[in-house]
Image: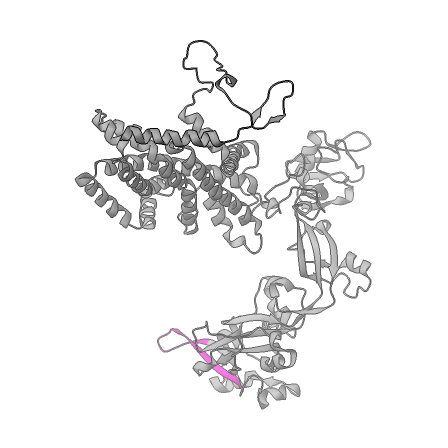
Amino acid sequence: MGSSTQESEWGKRNSMLEDKDFELLDESPNAGEIIEDADISKDDFVLTQVDSSVHEQKFQTKPTTFLKDSLKRFGKNKSSVVAAYILGALLLMSFIVPLVDTSNTKVAHPYETYLAPKLFKAGTGFWDGTIKYSNIAVDLSEMPDAKTEEEKQLHWWPSSKKFPQRSAISKKVFTEEKYSNDISNLGTFGKEGYVHFGYYESEASDYVAFSSKAIPSLVLDNDLYLTSFDTYDANKIREKEGKDSFNAPDNYVVGESAFYFLYSELNTDNVLEDKEIKLVDYATVHNIGSAVERLKEEKLNISDIIKNETGGQTEFQNASFSVRLNVEHEHQKNTCALIRSITFESASTSENIRNIFNDMSFTDATKAMTKSINDGYEYWSSTGVRRIYLSKAHFCSFVYDTYEAAFGVRQIEGEFVSDLLTYADKGWISFKDQFGLDTVWKDDSGYFIDRTNYSFKILDPVNCPLAKEITADDFYGDDVFGTLGVKFSVHYYKYLGYTKAPIYLMGTDKSGRDMFKYVFEGLRTSLLLGVLTFAVCFTFGLIWGSICGYFGGAVDLLMERFTDILSGIPWIVVMTLIILHFGSNFWTFALALCLTGWIGTAARTRTQFYRFRGREYVLASRTLGASDARLIAKHILPNALGTIITGAVLMIPSVIFSEATISYLGLGLKNTSSLGVVLSDNQAELLTNPYLLIFPAVIIALIMISFNLFGNGLRDAINPSLKGED
């Protein structure tokens, strides 16, 4: 039955072949022509054979190894290759830059602080070491009535404290006089305005006071007058100028206020006790009452009020005056006031007392706010919020070349005659008289100069720091006692010992450290810490997870419970205890990271071993007598390694982030630079000098992204199941 069925099938196939029409390609001289309806016979086909014997031929392709095959697959993953190049470049730079860059990051460089990043020549407008400033108040003292643009350019300048070198300022653009509420920007160049002080919801007391500096010992031997006290209602100003004209909460109120005299007095227990006398009682700040209204016509004798309240007392300790805003109700928690002037007139016989009250008096609120800037003595302060409001000034926008300011030509003066003698010894300069004798010399008494026969010449302008020759008039002091000084102009980079002005690609920080070297020194430490931690944690975690996953049962149960207990302790607690006990150094930090860092690798390894240990090829190898060690190392681990290593590689950037986190908490590495320490040192500079955080942050971002891509490519490359695939 089976035979007949097979024959019928062959019959059907033959009939199908017979019914088909074939097209035969003729290889005769008329090649290329199609012969239709051709008859095909056995003779039309010829068997071609290399030789008479049939045999197996040698493979034309070369055999490959697992490593070569992995590298081939890795090379086809373009993103992983780019990531590998980036990681390699960062690794090389972390070791090469600290060796090649000669700047010292261990010591401070006070003359090179906050230099902007520079790669291109100044004036290009990008990465050129310049900083653009806008709306900076300018000093008009040289020519307050300057009209033309040329006069302004020559005589109007921003603060010399913030911008010491005029030669570094360019592209100045001035504004007309306008209002400002930013006292830090105004400096000492603002005028008029109001002292805005008040009590806001963040304050905890029942009142806020605007108080004068305490007078340790005050004697009211003659009359003391309050000649002016101008206060204003901020509500009315905001209604007039607009809602945004006054910087205060929408629900602020005008509080009950009074003017007080405060002093200290010994009580019956011989202890100093604070006392106060209300000099003027106001209904409200904007309705100040008849007593102060009289100040417009006559002075208010406050010494009479004080004597009446104290029974004729005239000597007081720790005396001061205070404007107090009271808050009696919860809904009055936002209270503020504006003060334009407070002036006193003292008829005391003591010049010191008269000067104190003259210093306390002010008719210009901006000057009162900035007296501490002028002479270091703050005459008025507030227990609450205090700021300037509607101060007037001219403002300027300009470009400041930080390198010209730091290393350009500047004038120095002092007892620097020793520098000139040093330059003369080196052959850079010469100061001789007509007989060839030195006109400046030193003996046991000090430095001396013969100004009558003086000649000076720069012999080596390349090495000599002096920008111009010195005349006899540049020397000052007393030759008799040898207290001779000199003022001269120098190229400051030469004066600091540089052969040419340095350039810092990433700028400098508050200590003048080269951020380019400092960042890569930190990167080297962070990478060494990450690689060391990775090596220890990966090795131990791989062994631990392999044993758990392969043997299972009671072994796995006991080992996993230990892991659960260890992982249940917060990492930050373990880190803190280790650092506090052993100190914060590189090896202690690595130990703290390794104590729990292996748990993740162990967990991934255990999972993969449970996945592969029951596969057929493992069972077959065990049947053939393979040992447990061979099964783990040769059969299971290679197949599981791809997934394990992907997560493990990310341990390196994770360690860097962990170290940065600890540094922010104040437990970072001590006396060692790392990326975490760099970020921690400069976290306060985010708004003022953001480049100090941008560059290390970019390095960390590159490390994180590159390690992620590199790990993905490595996972695919070492996966045995993909061997031979493209």
Q: Please check the rendered image and state whether residue 280 is part of the magenta-colored stretch, yes or no.
A: yes
Residue 628's image quarter? Answer: top left
Count the numbered circles shown: 0
Q: Where is residue 633 in the image (x, y as percent from the top left)?
A: 29, 29
Along the line of sight, the residue nearer the viewer: 584 or 283: 584
The answer to whether residue 397 is above or below residue 218 is above
| 426 sits to left or right of 515 | right
**Magenta residues, dominant SS class:** strand
Q: Where is residue 192 in the image (x, y as percent from the top left)?
A: 67, 72
Q: Position of residue 617 (x, y in %)?
A: 28, 30
Along the line of sight, the residue nearer the viewer: 428 or 71: 71
Q: Please check the rendered image and state whether residue 207 is part of the magenta-colored stretch, yes or no.
A: no
What residue sits 60% from the left and 68% below the top?
369
Q: Give the range drawn in magenta.
A: 264-282
Tell me if residue 636 can be seen: yes
What residue sits 62% from the left and 80% below the top?
237
Q: Position of residue 354 (x, y in %)?
A: 61, 73
Along the line of sight, the residue nearer the viewer: 380 or 549: 549
Residue 370's image quarter? Answer: bottom right
Looking at the rendering, in which quadrant would you find the N terminus? top left
Tell me if residue 187 can be seen: no
The answer to whether residue 570 is above or below residue 297 is above
| 644 sits to left or right of 233 | left
Specify the farthest residue to the top: 52
The answer to whether residue 182 is above or below residue 621 is below
What residue sits 18% from the left and 40% below the top?
553
Specify the farthest residue to the bottom: 290
Along the line of sight, the residue nearer the viewer: 438 or 500: 500
